[in-house]
Amino acid sequence: MKKLTVIFLLLSLLVSCQTKRQYFPKDLEPQQIDLVRFDCALLNVDSVSALQDIRILYEQFPDFMPFFVEDILGLPVVDTACLVRQLPAFLNDTLYGFAQTNRLEQTVFADTKDIEHDLGNAFARVHFLYPELPVPTVYLFISGFNSSLVFVDDDIAVGADMYLGSDYEFYNRVVYEYQKLTMRKECIPVDVVSAFLFRHLPYTSTKSRLLDNMLYRGKIMYLLAQIFSDLPSYEVMGYTKEQWDWCVRNERAIWHLMMDKRDLFKTESLVLTSYLNDGPFTSEISQDSPGRLGTWVGWRIAESFMQHNQQVTLQELVSEPDAERILRDSYYKP
C-alpha cells in the first residue's frame, strides 16, 4: 500500500511539473515604457485660444498630431482654420456625451502608474523572447468613441475614452452589450500586448482552414497568457469567469460537435467568422456559448501541445506552421 502511495505522489508531482512550465527568468528588468499623455494636452485646448493651442500641439506632437487630425477627426491636416472651429466643438460637445466623457476620462486616468507597471513587465517578457522587436511608445488619446487601439507606425495609441468602465452609460449608445466587458482601464495592458503580438507575429499559413486560423490565434493567446501569467485565464481571454467556466464544462461537447460537423477543415468565411470573430455567442456551437470559441479551443490545443512537448520553446510553438502536427502532437482529447 505504501508503495502505491509513493507511486501516486510521484505521478502527481510529474503532472504538476508538466502543467507549470517556467518560460522566463524571475529577475527580468521591466522595460521602460513611454506613456505619452496626448489626452491631457488635447483637453487643454480652449475655444478662445484654439489657434495657439493647436500650434502647440503640432510642436509637441509632430508625429501624432497629424495622425489624430486626419485619421481620428477626419479633417485635412493643412486646414488649420477648419480645425480651429471643429476641435473645440468636438471636445465640448454634450449631445453625444464627449464633454462628460472627457471629464470622466481625466478622473479615471489621473494616475497611470498601474498601466506603466504592467506594460513594463509584459514587454520585458516580450523582449526576452523577441529582442529584435521594438518596444512601442504608447499614446493615450481621446477618440470620440471611435477607436480603442490603433497603430501609428511602430507605436500604439489607446483611445482612453473607450476604457472608462463596463457600466459607463454612454457606451450603451455606441457598442453592443458583449463589447462592454473589456472596456475597463485594467484591460489596457493585455489589449496593447495582444495587438502588438498579432501585428508582429502575423498569420503565415497558406491554408485558410478553420484549423489553421484557430491554432494561429490559440498560439498567440497561449503566449499572451504566459506573458500575463499573474492574471486569470478568463481575463486574458476577455471573458467573464462564468463564460470561461461554461467553456470548460462543455469542452468535450464543443470538440465533438466541431468534429461531427467537420468544421476544422472548412474554409467558408461564415464558419470562420462565427468561430473567430467577437460576438455575443458562437453561432456554430450554441447561443449559450461566448464568442470567439474557436480561439478558445485553439488555445487549449496549444496548451496541451506544450504540456506534451516539454522541449518546445514558446518561439518554436508560435513559428510552427503545421497546424495538423500541433493538433496531432497535442493529444488533445477533452
Image: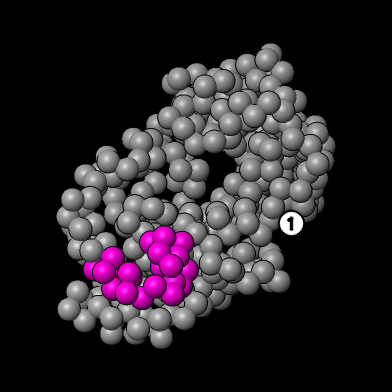
Q: Position of residue 88 (x, y in %)?
A: 24, 68
Q: Quadrant of the C terminus?
A: top right
Indicate left or right for 241 with 202 as reference: left
In percent of the image, x 38 and y 53: which residue is there?
Answer: 146
Indicate left or right for 12 with 147 as reference: right
Q: Nearer the viewer, residue 77 or 215?
A: 77
Q: Nearer the viewer, residue 152 or 46?
A: 46
Can see residue 196? yes
> Is residue 92 magenta-colored?
no
Colouring convention used in this rendered image of the protein: one colour
Q: How many badges with numbers are in the image?
A: 1
Q: Residues within 10 Å of mark 1 (few under 14, many from 20)?
A: few
The residues colored magenta run: 66-88
Q: Quadrant of the N terminus?
A: top right
Q: In the rendered view, would you say 229 is above or below 77?
A: above
Q: Which residue is mark 1?
A: 315
Indicate left or right for 302 with 150 as reference: right
Can see residue 30? no
Q: Amino acid at mark 1?
A: Gln
Asked where in the image residue 103 lies, by quadrant, the reply is bottom left
In percent of the image, x 52 and y 22: which residue is there?
Answer: 283
Q: Nearer the viewer, residue 223 or 156?
A: 156
In percent of the image, x 34 and y 35: which residue is there?
Answer: 177
Q: Position of residue 301 (x, y in %)?
A: 68, 36
